[in-house]
Image (cartoon, rainbow, N blue to C red):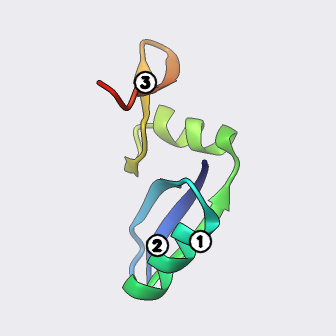
Amino acid sequence: MFYAIRRRAGSDRQTLVEFAKKADMDATSVSKGNVYSIVPAKIAREWVRRGREHETGLYLDGGSIRYANPSN
């Protein structure tokens, strides 16, 4: 799994997203007109810590960043 910042062409909106494989990201960017910038996990955790928009399993629990268990 890896993280990327998604930007729609012609928009300033940025959203942190996660992908299992690079092929998934490539397929999404072509079909929807999105541009992605891959970011290290450290940057992704800081993004969530600052309360920025994301579509990931990351969440803030007290002062710690956690990853949601997909079975919950």
Pinpoint residue 6: horizontal percent, then vertical percent. 48, 67
Residue placed furthest toward the left? 72
Which callout, 1 or 3, points at the residue further toward the start of the chain?
Answer: 1
Asked which secondary structure carries label 1, the reply is: helix
What is the three-letter code of the residue carrying label 2? Arg
Q: Is residue 69 above or below residue 11?
A: above
Q: Quadrant of residue 10?
A: bottom left
On residue 8, the disc is none
Marks 1 and 2, Cα distance to the nearest angstrom? 18 Å
Asked which secondary structure carries label 3, the reply is: strand
What is the three-letter code of the residue carrying label 3? Leu
**Crowd around label 1: few <14 · some 14–19 · many ≥20 (10 Å):** few
Marks 1 and 3, Cα distance to the nearest angstrom? 29 Å
Q: Is residue 19 above or below residue 36?
A: above
Tell which of 22 and 53 is nearer to you. 22
Pinpoint residue 26: horizontal percent, then vertical percent. 56, 77
Q: Is residue 60 above or below residue 37?
A: above
Residue under pointer 3:
60
Which callout, 1 or 2, points at the residue further toward the start of the chain?
Answer: 2
Residue under pointer 1:
23
